[in-house]
Image (cartoon, rainbow, N blue to C red):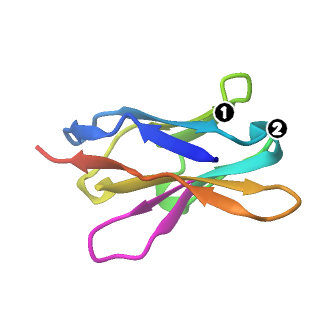
């Protein structure tokens, strides 16, 4: 059974940082592209960042470039999202997604809440 478990969310002041983690189990982690999405109240889910299965390539949404960094440790079956210079508009539930590089099937975590407020 595939499980993706996010952690690391919380309440942080504007300008602060959080490191989100997503631990995967039940799959061959190195065969999956990993993505972080987020969904704010009343808004559609949006892609935050993506990292290829080898970690060799990353992409970011324009509003996150220079502030967020996605990384992965295939030995630990974990993907990370380092979030810096957080703004109130970054408040959302952050979700981890795993997509198989060949078959395309994907899995979602349950999400972790990030709240940026003074």
> As rendered, which of 37 and 58 lies closer to the eye?
37
- At x 22%, y 38%, the residue is 12
Quadrant position of the C terminus in the picture: top left
Which label number is shown at residue 72?
1
- Above or below, comparing residue 23 to residue 103 in the picture: above
- Above or below, comparing residue 26 to residue 74 in the picture: below
Is 100 part of what is drawn in magenta? no
> As rendered, which of 53 and 105 lies closer to the eye?
105
- At x 49%, y 41%, the residue is 5
Corner quadrant of residue 57: top right
Q: Callout 1 environment at 10 Å: few (<14), some (14 to 19), or many (20+)?
A: many
Corner quadrant of residue 77: top right
Is 40 part of what is drawn in magenta? yes
Element at label 1: strand
Residue 89: percent from the left, percent from the top? 29, 59
Q: Residue furthest right?
A: 102
> As rendered, which of 58 and 97 lies closer to the eye?
97
Q: Is residue 70 left or right of residue 55?
A: left
Cα separation, mark 2 vs mark 1, equals 9 Å
**Can I make out residue 21 in this image?**
yes
Mark 2 or mark 1, which has the lower sequence index? 2
Element at label 2: loop
**Can I make out residue 52 in this image?**
no
Which label number is shown at residue 54?
2
Residue 111: percent from the left, percent from the top? 41, 52
Q: Is residue 85 left or right of residue 107?
A: left
Which label number is shown at residue 86?
none
Q: Range of the magenta residues? A: 36-48
Residue 16: percent from the left, percent from the top? 28, 34
Q: Is residue 51 left or right of residue 113?
A: right
């Amino acid at each position: 059974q595939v499980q993706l478990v996010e952690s690391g969310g919380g309440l942080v002041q504007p300008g602060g940082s959080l490191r989100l983690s997503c631990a995967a189990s039940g799959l061959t982690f190195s065969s999956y592209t990993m993505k972080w999405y987020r969904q704010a109240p009343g808004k559609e889910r949006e892609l935050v960042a993506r990292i290829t299965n080898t970690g060799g390539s990353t992409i970011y949404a324009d509003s996150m470039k220079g502030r967020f960094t996605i990384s992965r440790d295939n030995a630990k079956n974990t993907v990370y999202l380092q979030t810096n210079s957080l703004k109130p508009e970054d408040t959302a539930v952050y979700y981890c997604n795993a997509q198989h590089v060949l078959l395309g099937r994907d899995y979602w975590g349950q999400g972790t809440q990030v709240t940026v407020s003074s």
